[in-house]
Amino acid sequence: EKDNDAETPLHTACRFEAPLGVVSVLLNIWPDAVKEKNWNGETPLHTACYYEAPFDVVTVLMHTWANAASEKDKYELIPLHIACTKRQSFQSTTLLCNNWLEDKKNRTSHGLVDLKKFIDFSRSEYAKKLFSNVSNLHCGKTGNPTLNELLRFFIGIKLWNGVAFVLDKHPAIVRTINLDTMLMGDFLSMTGRCCRLTTMWEVISNEQDLLGGA
């Protein structure tokens, strides 16, 4: 049932930062509640981002509905836009950004300009740094930080679609990095899932160089 604002119990749980256990019970009872919108066109994920819900709640909402992070409200805002203007955790912001970068059209000037206006009003220094790095990569401003530093930053926070963005633009950089053994499996798996075939071939060709620092 919805209330007078067209909100489901799942919206309410996200609004009041309910723990994962409560959210999971509600999703078990009504899985499609994750797709329901209130009068403002907001899904429970929009609400979770607005009220800075815990990371595990944001995660389960995104896993329950694959399109949750790309759904727009009546103001054409996706959950990432909202997270950027709040003090959402760096884990949630990274997860949302990784999903956003999966769509290659968001790696274009139009996509980045659309997001920048929200970053400018962000209360999160992490969000500002994250998207400044993504924007610098697109614009070719890779002197400070360097390409290698950008790549290591994205690998460190496991922003795998950000890593793919770097490699697709500058595939030769794989020759210059030495990855810790703990990260190698994730790195190679990401390359297969997220990068172009030509990029993947470059990585495979240099696999022994990559393993050299392990």
Image: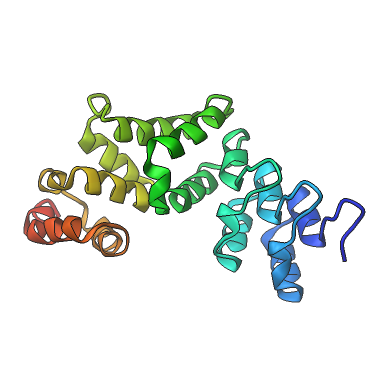
Residue 16: give x, y in percent of width and height. Answer: 78, 49
Residue 137: give x, y in percent of width and height. Answer: 30, 34
Q: On the picture, is 82 further left or further right than 11? A: left
Residue at left 73%, top 53%?
14
**Rendered-image quadrant of the N terminus:** bottom right
Q: Quadrant of residue 50?
A: top right
Q: Quadrant of residue 143?
A: top left
Residue at left 35%, top 46%?
162
How did the renderer colour the structure?
Answer: rainbow
Count of numbered circles in the view: 0
Q: Residue furthest bottom?
A: 29
Residue 64: give x, y in percent of width and height. Answer: 60, 67
Q: Residue furthest right?
A: 4
Residue 111: give x, y in percent of width and height. Answer: 45, 39
Residue at left 12%, top 56%?
202
Q: Eyeballing the image, is 1 above or below 115?
A: below
Q: Nearer the viewer, residue 53 or 106?
A: 106
**Rendered-image quadrant of the C terminus:** bottom left
Q: On the picture, is 129 further left or further right than 168? A: right
Residue at left 75%, top 72%?
30
Q: Nearer the viewer, residue 120 or 9?
A: 120
Q: Nearer the viewer, residue 98 or 124?
A: 98
